[in-house]
Amino acid sequence: MTERKKIAIIGGGNMGVALANGIVASGLHRASDITLTRRNLRSLESLAQEGFHITSNNEAAVAGADIIILSILPQQLNGVLDAIAPVVDPQRHLFVSIVTGVRVADIIQRVGKEVQVIRAMPNTAIAIRESMTCIAGSMATEENQALVRQIFQAVGETVEIEEELMTSATALCACGIAFFLRSIRAATQGGTEIGFHAGDALRMAAQTAKGAASLLLHFQSHPENEIDKVTSPKGCTIAGLNEMEHHGFSSAMIKGIKTSSHKAEQLYKNE
Ligand SMILES: NC(=O)C1=CN([C@@H]2O[C@H](COP(=O)(O)OP(=O)(O)OC[C@H]3O[C@@H](n4cnc5c(N)ncnc54)[C@H](O)[C@@H]3O)[C@@H](O)[C@H]2O)C=CC1
Ligand SMILES: O=C(O)[C@@H]1CCC=N1
């Protein structure tokens, strides 16, 4: 269905490039269907050699595309929308915004046209097509919702949510990558202190974390269910786990997620 659609990714940074690569790796689109924009094109030159179109001209990119993926920072959004507004055609263009903290209504208002907008919140695991992407776009047509679902399903899992939960999704799933990575780093530091070389400890901790997540997804079980299988009575696991809780392990994660969610809400307002 998306085969004939042309995509413009406005903002070829971390997410824009990872998304472009992921879409092509999935086979959903050819590189030649995708244009990436960026003010300084030097870091996109290797992508041009792979067949992607690259340009600094956002207006031209939008004029030549059907699907416009906004992948700039919140503070960069208004300038970009002001520049592309004259070439936006609501009959043709579908906007997909991964910009944190910006509502569908904000984009429509800034563009000044009744264009369809779907919000998506992927995470950096799109680079390996393992993203958890939350999508909110109930105001768009079914066809356009299906189109966007197809794009993000090509680069991982998707879940559809109400737009009012988008900043929560940002904290849990997009920021969440960093939270889980930090916990793996902490495990690595612990592993090194008890005798492993740092590189070995990292590989061991990362595979253990992957195993833990896979258990939940495979059995569709609750973490405590799997934890119960590890914690032998009077054993070493429960001793370590309780020590972590005495130091606020769960509390720190919960408070961090709440803080990130609150901050995500403020990013565009305070731009
Ligand atoms: N990094 C992450 O894990 C996630 C980020 N997001 C959101 O995605 C958006 C992009 O994030 P990143 O890729 O991490 O940021 P980034 O800073 O790596 O990418 C933004 C890109 O936009 C380019 N840019 C700036 N002004 C431009 C303009 N006028 N025209 C064309 N390109 C322009 C910059 O040169 C940069 O390459 C942000 O709104 C962020 O909140 C969403 C989910 C996850
Ligand atoms: O830290 C940020 O603001 C962005 C949004 C979600 C992940 N990174």
Image (cartoon, rainbow, N blue to C red):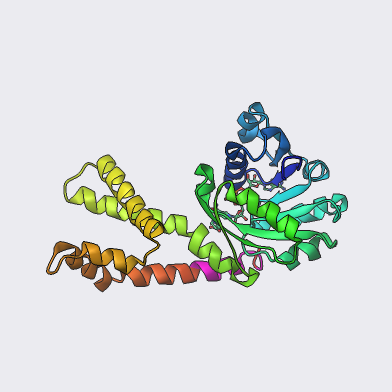
Outermost residue, left side:
234
Q: Let me know if residue 80 appears in the view.
A: yes
Residue 215 falls within the magenta-colored stretch: no
Outermost residue, front side:
219
Measuring from the top left, give residue 236's x and y in whole percent. 15, 62
Quadrant that contains the C terminus: bottom right
Q: Residue at horizontal 39%, vertical 56%?
A: 218
Measuring from the top left, give residue 152's x and y in whole percent. 61, 51
Q: Let me know if residue 54 appears in the view.
A: no
Q: Give the vertical position of 70 relative to 239 (above or below).
A: above
Residue 267 falls within the magenta-colored stretch: yes
Measuring from the top left, give residue 196's x and y in whole percent. 20, 44
Residue nearer the viewer, 94 or 4: 4
Q: Which residues are magenta?
A: 260-269
Measuring from the top left, give residue 24's x and y in whole percent. 62, 37
Left or right of residue 249: residue 140 = right
Magenta: predominant secondary structure element? helix
Left or right of residue 260: residue 245 = left
Q: Quadrant of residue 46?
A: top right
